[in-house]
Amino acid sequence: MNTIRGIAAAEGIAIGTAWVLPHIDAEDGQGEGAEAAAEPERQKLKLQQTLERVRQDLEKVYEQAQAKHGDGTAKIVKGQILMTKDRSWIEGMARLIEEERVSAEFAVKTKVDELIRMFESMDNAYMRERASDVRDLGNRLLMRFKGAAYGGGEPFGGPVVWVANDLPPSLTVALDPDTVQAWITETGGRTSHSSILARSLGIPAVVGAGDLRERIRTGQTLIVDGGSGVVLVDPSPALLREYEEKRRKLAESRSRLARWKDEPTATADGKRIALQANIGHADEASEASRQGAEGIGLFRSEFLFMHRDDFPAEDEQLAAYRKSVESMDGKPVTIRTLDIGGDKELPYLQVPKELNPFLGYRAIRLCLDRPRLFLTQLRAILRASHYGQVRLMLPMICAAEEIREAHRLLQQAREELEREGIAYDPYMKVGIMVETPAAALLMDQFGGMVDFVSIGTNDLVQYTMACDRMNEAVARLYQPYHPAVLRQIRYIAEQAHRHGITVSLCGEWGSEASALPLLIGLGLDAISMSASSILGIRERAASLDSEYCAQLAAAALQCASQEEVLSLLNPSKIQS
């Protein structure tokens, strides 16, 4: 048995059969073979038939992706479909088969490798990203040559555990949770797309596990513990029984938590705190509702702009926002305006490379500098407010001037809609994300300018501690429990409440049960988190006393380090 350790990305335990998704650099089709050398016409026919089957597969995926996510996401697959019809590319493979007497598999791999190298060498970032689409198509073709499905569970008659470098685009856009029990990836982190997707679907996942191809083979039995980041390969019967029991207890726990779905969130002494969900796609809103979310505290609208070759049109954005609003059935949906930059790029945006993009041209800075782009999104959000309780949230605010300029453009969008006779909610609430020390320290100046604030701890921690949260060399400095962070949260809450402004938190930190007493004690009105964490946090809140939480927070504010704060939160010392 082998033990593989990675990053715990999505809680849950899965026991299943490994399905290693192919890599284009795997040794597929390397040998030419006597058959290939003697029968080029047969190999060319094999190539044509395989391209046709893959094209049919992709057309089905395209329809599923379009129905689930709209035209923007489905464009990824559309490009691959066009490649299977590209005459010059197909003729190049056929010539290779004819002239070099190689197999169809070898011809595909050779030509796909050439395209990948070409795209990866390009200066344009968008074109470089197309290499992953080509690699994905190449892998799909190679699997078809073997007569195997690409990523599904058919070879074993049931669901599988995906093992991959990262989730291939054409599989991700139409993922069926019923056929995939869990996944393990070589790359990624807790905030990567594959991790967020896993949590939203309730699928156990371990990411960032390093080279897996030498350690896992298709058909091996795997135990995936998404809560601890551990993967066991070909476990002993005793370990299988142990994890079956753990899985049973986890299922019992989830069954127990189900009773909290329709309950309001409150401490034992009645203090209310709303638990909301973070989402990146409109489809996730319905899952958030099923998990008992009291609203959407963060709709990451930038995901509508990613994995495509142009900006989404106003109507396309409206369709996504409206879908999420209607899924929440009257509960608030907080839509964050475009937050691109830092670790999120739009290749088609054509912005210069920056030495430190987290401190550069991103989020509200970019939107205010490109008013037509911003106005299109503001119009779509305003129009969505006609269908339910929408709240608009501005990211990466550092100064009051940015809020005033955003309000000016929002008013322009209102006036345009009124002239066109398009309905919207004139009383839609507007808020900001507080994720920089500058915004935290200026909180006393924002009265009358915003209706709510949401503390983005992912960025607030890294800016406060001066550490890049994506840099492993300084990862130890990323300390959400540090008193410097806690004091800012307390100050934000005090100043906001003084002006009648509600305060929420929307970082991943909010889903940690150990942080809940502190966050309640620091004065938050709401916490937004992964939907799968809501019921557990709601149950935990019901066991706490708000006065005790206030005392605990006061003690934490006097600490000198994260270690001291964590010692206060020792489970043996926390009220249960």
Image: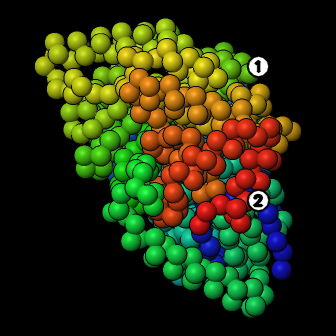
Which residue is farthest left? 421
Give the amino acid at mark 2: Gly
Give the amino acid at mark 1: Leu
Q: Residue at x 56, y 17 (%)?
A: 442
Residue 208 location (% of width, % of height): 74, 53
Q: Relative to residue 505, is residue 180 depicted above or below?
A: below
Question: In this figure, which colouring scheme has been used for the structure?
Answer: rainbow
Mark positioned earlier in the residue sequence (1 or 2)? 2
Residue 547 location (% of width, % of height): 53, 51
Q: Relative to residue 233, is residue 129 depicted above or below?
A: above
Q: Is residue 99 visible?
A: no
Q: Which residue carries the number 2 mark? A: 6
Residue 281 location (% of width, % of height): 43, 45
Q: Are there few (<14), some (14-19), or many (20+) residues within 10 Å of tag 2?
A: many
Left or right: 111 with respect to 446?
right
User: Which type of secondary structure does the marked residue at label 1 adopt?
Assistant: loop
Q: Residue at x 24, y 25 (%)?
A: 427
Q: Which residue carries the number 1 mark? A: 355
Left or right: 406 with respect to 134?
left
Q: Residue at x 69, y 48 (%)?
A: 189
